[in-house]
Protein backbone atom coordinates (compact mmCIF):
# COMPACT_ATOMS: atom_id res chain seq x y z
CA UNK A 1 0.00 0.00 0.00
CA UNK A 2 2.87 2.38 0.74
CA UNK A 3 4.20 1.88 -2.76
CA UNK A 4 0.89 3.08 -4.17
CA UNK A 5 1.34 6.31 -2.21
CA UNK A 6 4.89 6.65 -3.56
CA UNK A 7 3.56 6.17 -7.10
CA UNK A 8 0.94 8.84 -6.37
CA UNK A 9 3.63 11.22 -5.19
CA UNK A 10 5.65 10.51 -8.33
CA UNK A 11 2.57 11.13 -10.49
CA UNK A 12 1.96 14.49 -8.81
CA UNK A 13 5.60 15.49 -9.28
CA UNK A 14 5.48 14.51 -12.96
CA UNK A 15 2.26 16.49 -13.46
CA UNK A 16 3.79 19.52 -11.74
CA UNK A 17 6.86 19.32 -13.94
CA UNK A 18 4.87 18.84 -17.15
CA UNK A 19 2.74 21.86 -16.25
CA UNK A 20 5.47 24.24 -15.09
CA UNK A 21 8.50 23.38 -17.23
CA UNK A 22 7.11 24.60 -20.58
CA UNK A 23 6.00 27.86 -18.94
CA UNK A 24 9.59 28.70 -18.05
CA UNK A 25 11.47 30.51 -20.78
CA UNK A 26 14.63 29.09 -22.29
CA UNK A 27 16.81 31.71 -20.61
CA UNK A 28 15.46 30.96 -17.10
CA UNK A 29 18.21 28.49 -16.24
CA UNK A 30 18.46 29.38 -12.54
CA UNK A 31 14.72 29.07 -12.09
CA UNK A 32 14.71 25.71 -13.83
CA UNK A 33 17.57 24.46 -11.66
CA UNK A 34 15.83 25.67 -8.50
CA UNK A 35 12.54 24.10 -9.59
CA UNK A 36 14.22 20.78 -10.32
CA UNK A 37 16.16 20.75 -7.05
CA UNK A 38 13.15 21.68 -4.91
CA UNK A 39 10.94 19.16 -6.71
CA UNK A 40 13.43 16.34 -6.18
CA UNK A 41 14.03 17.27 -2.54
CA UNK A 42 10.30 17.57 -1.90
CA UNK A 43 9.68 14.20 -3.51
CA UNK A 44 12.40 12.55 -1.43
CA UNK A 45 11.04 14.10 1.76
CA UNK A 46 7.49 13.02 0.91
CA UNK A 47 8.61 9.43 0.25
CA UNK A 48 10.63 9.33 3.46
CA UNK A 49 7.61 10.54 5.42
CA UNK A 50 5.52 7.75 3.90
CA UNK A 51 7.92 5.07 5.12
CA UNK A 52 9.01 6.79 8.36
CA UNK A 53 6.06 8.89 9.59
CA UNK A 54 7.61 9.33 13.06
CA UNK A 55 10.47 11.34 11.53
CA UNK A 56 10.76 14.65 13.36
CA UNK A 57 9.87 17.73 11.38
CA UNK A 58 11.84 20.92 10.93
CA UNK A 59 10.32 22.54 14.02
CA UNK A 60 11.72 19.81 16.27
CA UNK A 61 15.15 20.39 14.71
CA UNK A 62 14.93 24.13 15.34
CA UNK A 63 13.80 23.50 18.93
CA UNK A 64 16.73 21.16 19.54
CA UNK A 65 19.21 23.69 18.15
CA UNK A 66 17.88 26.79 19.90
CA UNK A 67 16.75 25.33 23.25
CA UNK A 68 20.24 25.57 24.82
CA UNK A 69 20.63 29.10 23.48
CA UNK A 70 17.31 30.15 25.00
CA UNK A 71 18.36 28.72 28.37
CA UNK A 72 21.64 30.65 28.28
CA UNK A 73 19.90 33.92 27.37
CA UNK A 74 17.33 33.41 30.14
CA UNK A 75 20.11 32.83 32.68
CA UNK A 76 21.91 35.98 31.58
CA UNK A 77 18.79 38.12 31.77
CA UNK A 78 17.95 36.73 35.23
CA UNK A 79 21.45 37.55 36.47
CA UNK A 80 21.30 41.10 35.14
CA UNK A 81 17.83 41.84 36.49
CA UNK A 82 18.24 40.32 39.88
Image (cartoon, grey):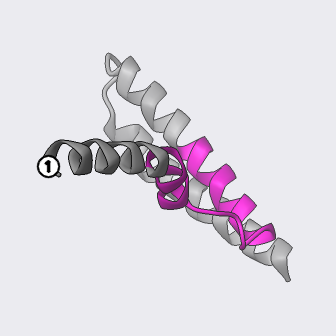
State the residue in front, 56 or 42: 56
State the residue in front, 27 or 48: 48
Q: Is residue 22 left or right of 77 when viewed as pictured?
A: right
The location of residue 61, given as percent across then percent down, is 55, 52
Q: Main secondary structure of the magenta part?
A: helix
State the residue in front, 36 or 74: 74
Residue located at (32% from left, 40% from top): 23
Q: In the orientation shown, which residue stands out farthest toward the front?
A: 82
The location of residue 60, given as percent across then percent down, is 54, 60
Residue located at (57% from left, 56% from top): 13
Asked if residue 50 is among those painted magenta in the image, a careful observer would answer yes
- Identify the residue under disc 1: 81
The location of residue 68, given as percent across then percent down, is 48, 46
State the residue in front, 64 or 8: 64
Q: Quadrant of residue 57?
A: bottom right
Magenta span covers which residues?
Answer: 39-66
Residue located at (33% from left, 48% from top): 75
Disc 1 crowd, CA 10 A, few/some/many (<14, 14-19, 20+): few
| For residue 68, above or below residue 6 | above
The location of residue 26, given as percent across then percent down, is 36, 21
Residue located at (45% from left, 37% from top): 35
| For residue 35, above or below residue 30 | below
Q: Quadrant of the N terminus?
A: bottom right
Amino acid sequence: MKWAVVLGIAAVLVCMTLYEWPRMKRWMKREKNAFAALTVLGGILACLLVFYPETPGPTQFIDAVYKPLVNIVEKLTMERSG
